[in-house]
Image (spheres, grey):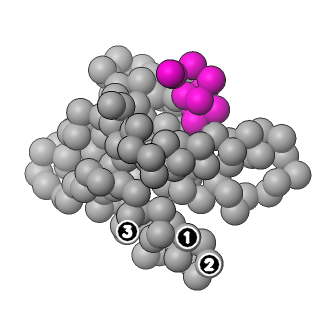
Amino acid sequence: MNLIYLDYNCFQRGFDDPQQVKIQLEALACEEVFKKAEVKTVRLVWSFMHEDENLLCPFLDRKLEVARLSALCKVRIGPNKEIYDIAKGFQQRSKLSAKDAIHLACAYSTKSSFFLTCDEKLIKRAGKLNLEIEIMNPVDYIREVK
């Protein structure tokens, strides 16, 4: 069973502008990943970074929906020195933002098979790290992974 780490934007994608076809497709793909978690064909990770970002979300409806979706995440990871050190290394090697580096370090630390994000710049930068994690857009995950 695949262990998947979703970037926070995957939890929020359903709230973004549905006028853009790219966003519609990503929202549907993220919804499909959540359905797979509901029927236990994949496992999802929830980290302290997800929790922090959700606490900072200014929109109550979004915050509540993400909190509901977080219950589907059966693997939980809290902050620790190892994640901090890994994230710092990722930042130095590929110019990731602090948040992106922490999310990626959490995925790496939990030995996730996939890191899904709607952020194309993050996919490109994280790809340079040559990690043993498939880093991709949720649409590509749904298309390519059985």
The residue beneath circle 3 is 52
For image coordinates 54% across by 56% down, the residue present is 11
- Say which amino acid is labelled 1: Glu
Q: Residue furthest left?
A: 81
Q: Nearer the viewer, mark 3 or mark 1?
A: 1
Q: Is residue 131 left or right of residue 9?
A: left
Q: Quadrant of residue 144?
A: top right
Residue at 59 percent of width and 59 percent of height: 12
Disc number for residue 61: 2
Q: CA distance from mark 3 to mark 1?
A: 15 Å
**Amino acid type, label 2:** Asp
Can residue 132 be seen at all in this image of the molecule?
yes
Q: Residue at x 62, y 78 (%)?
A: 61
Residue topped by disc 1: 65
- Circle 3/circle 2 CB separation < 8 Å: no
Question: Which residues, given as a range, are shown in magenta?
Answer: 137-146
Identify the residue at the far right of this view: 19
Is 66 inside the magenta-drawn segment?
A: no
